[in-house]
Amino acid sequence: MANFARTTDNHMPAISAKGRSMPPSPIRKLVPYAEAAKKRGTQVIHLNIGQPDIATPEVALDAIRHLDRTVIEYSHSAGYESYRKGLSAYYAQHGIAVTHEQILITNGGSEALLFGMMSCFEPGDEVIIPEPYYANYNSFAMSAGVKVVPVRCRIADGFALPSISAFEALITPKTKGILICNPGNPTGYLYSRFELETLRSIVLKHDLFLFADEVYREFCYDGAKHVSALELDGLDQHAILIDSVSKRYSMCGARVGAFITRNAELYATALKFAQARLSPPTFGQIASEAALRTPQSYFDAVVAEYVQRRDILVDGLNSIPGVSCPKPKGAFYCVAELPIDDSDAFCQWLLESFSHDGHTVMMAPATGFYADPATGRKQVRLAYVLEQPLLKLAVECLRRAVLEYPGSTVKEQAGEAVR
Amino acid sequence: MANFARTTDNHMPAISAKGRSMPPSPIRKLVPYAEAAKKRGTQVIHLNIGQPDIATPEVALDAIRHLDRTVIEYSHSAGYESYRKGLSAYYAQHGIAVTHEQILITNGGSEALLFGMMSCFEPGDEVIIPEPYYANYNSFAMSAGVKVVPVRCRIADGFALPSISAFEALITPKTKGILICNPGNPTGYLYSRFELETLRSIVLKHDLFLFADEVYREFCYDGAKHVSALELDGLDQHAILIDSVSKRYSMCGARVGAFITRNAELYATALKFAQARLSPPTFGQIASEAALRTPQSYFDAVVAEYVQRRDILVDGLNSIPGVSCPKPKGAFYCVAELPIDDSDAFCQWLLESFSHDGHTVMMAPATGFYADPATGRKQVRLAYVLEQPLLKLAVECLRRAVLEYPGSTVKEQAGEAVR
């Protein structure tokens, strides 16, 4: 055989175009700077990720600790029937009527999105997404060969849904769907029923799929009520609900999500993708099924805590000269506009060159949340998933930082004010 | 808004072409017949699936039962570093030198295959797979838009690897990879070092990626030793190892696999797909890391059990007039040729119209394991993952069934012999 082996080890087949253009995680490039800061002894306050510090419900952890199986078998490809029946009752409590045969359990919300995009869209099809949007939507779209067409939401409008005409200006013969995140990552924006009815009318008029990522359903504030895409009339064939237990039960590592639709043909199609990967995780499903018994008091306490955190962070941000941050009604993120030249440079500078009382702040530059990074050049996303004293400290860090940062645009005036 | 909502609920956007052509699970169409048989009181002996009845190692279950976490967080997108370091030591014991930075933990072997295909192949590229092959390879290839080109292995040759010339006859400018399963599902075939060297020479000569699905590594019989694709010289840029804990520890529901390559650019590319889906499952990784401490005695006992089961099933099959089944050296499947007209019809008939002492057998028609179903028309796949008395009973069922089946092709002769 040796005569065949002429190629040296330096030669290699090419990586795919899809693989090359796949975007890396938007905060990944900052990680080495955060690690260096920690090595210098600076405490980094992580506002950059949506990993809550909230305890997972005991009822879920207990189910895992009392595991009584001897063989960890595959579940049904659509997930355990008992869990899906439990979920059907959970949704009924939230005003969403779905049977267990309309629920497909997935490896997190991520896999639900991937199955949905693969099942609904041809390569080259377009999906409209209000921006700023969750950066990983780009990755799932790219996996399916789908083009993301952003429709701009403005910070001056509190990131409200744009008008029907703004959507219709973007609709082409290739447009096949709209994807929303409600309440939203990264903005925390909660869509009103009126806005959802607007989306409903566009979807029906242009015969589009409506993907609604509702993984933050439980996190709505100030008495606002969440409205699901599956509560809208006449969308049985069009609406797809993307869900996950990750945030609901602070159980991100369980990797249990759901793809939900009343469209039987679409469900059957997604199930074929699910059969190919055999089964969602058994342990995670056991924990998730038990978590359905989480008492309402758990959510009441968590929501009360997030409201306090939000108020500390958002009110604090708005008290900084030159900073503007709409107060979100849901999820646990906000997007703030800062008096700076470049959020990527600022976030790096915070880790590399700044500290206040031994602390600095890590944030996600909003450049990763816009189709055109330039749009997010002055904005950052902050997650309020840390304890209140740390959030207060983070605000004080940022108050100093926007003064000291060489690319600050309010340096002089603000500097005067402080003096 | 009402004026927009003209479309009735019967109207719906179209399912994608990919979704429509996605193959359903090859045994799914038989499930209703199995359920009906059970309702009639017939006991169905399930030889159709690779879900072992072997107990998961206690050390893995104990780790889950002693869970000491209060928040079930995301892990690193590549998996816990401690687990990857443990895996690196496990591979070293098997003669495979890889660092933890060459190991990416995935949601089962399935996700590893998907990441690999997405990272290596353009839509329209071709991958050569020795057939019969694991039916779900079609699904992952379809998800990535890749064309599967089968190279035929013959039951008369015991499903040995075809010659270099058979491969080269199939290589086109679109050929970008070869995918093997070793030991193989569905045939149980274990590749020799000579066969792997043959593949190595083809891969290097034509600059192809070599995917090696080695999830049955531990299950090699009769003193045969498994040789990994990562043990072959000069393939650092070409070889991708697909692995999983599912079969090794009878822990199919853990959904923990691995994508392993020494090609740094390819690893970085696959990691971007992994970052998009955030994290592999936390619980499954905890169990899998603990399972690394499974004693060798566990594997010795399991292998001894599978050898006995294999001998009962395969020797039994070969004792039936007109049946031929190569004795596999690995995994826990075999493919048998039967004296029948059509394996789909036969497998359905077994569930619908046959019973012997209150029992019948469910098998996977081999039509699902060939690119052209006609090739597998007389073959079935059987998994020997059940206790020995059931396997003996299954053989007796099949001995009767091939006589009674209306489409039997040895009915008369065999009928004479029995009389």
Image (spheres, coloured by chain):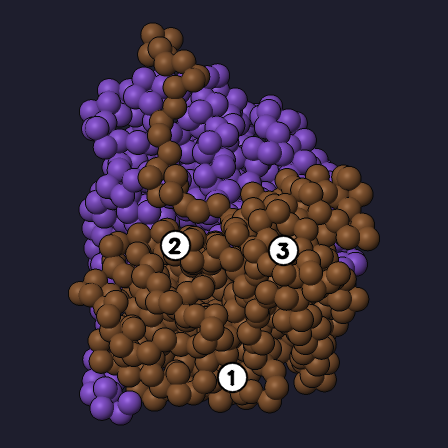
Chain colours: A purple, B brown
Q: Which residue is mark 2?
A: B372
Q: Residue at x 27, y 61 (%)?
A: B126
Q: Which residue is mark 3?
A: B411
Instruction: Look at label 2 and name its amino acid.
Output: Asp
**Residue B130 appears at what percent x and percent y?**
39, 68
Q: Residue at x 73, y 62 (%)?
A: B418
Q: Could you tell whether A315 is left or right of A257 in the image?
A: left
Mark 3: secondary structure: helix
Nearer the observer: mark 3 or 2; the answer is: 3
Depicted B12 relative to depicted A117: above or below: above
The foreground one among A385 and A337 is: A385
The CA distance from mark 2 to mark 1 is 30 Å
Tell me whether marks 3 and 2 sit on the same chain: yes
Question: Do callouts 3 and 2 mark residues in contact (Cβ within 8 Å)?
Answer: no
Q: Which residue is mark 1?
A: B226
Mark 1: secondary structure: loop
> Nearer the N terminus, badge 3 or badge 2?
2
The chain letter under disc 3 is B
> Nearer the N terminus, badge 2 or badge 1?
1
**Residue B352 appears at what percent x and percent y?**
67, 42
**Residue A121 appears at what percent x and percent y?**
33, 38
Mark linked to residue B150: none
The outermost residue toward the left is B173
The quadrant holding residue A90 is top right
**Residue B405 appears at what percent x and percent y?**
64, 50
Question: Do callouts 2 and 1 mark residues in contact (Cβ within 8 Å)?
Answer: no
Q: Could you tell whether B126 is left or right of B363 in the image?
A: left
The CA distance from mark 3 to mark 1 is 40 Å
Q: Could you tell whether B252 is left or right of B123 in the image?
A: right
Q: Is residue B263 visible?
A: no
Location of the N terminus of chain B by quadrant is: top left
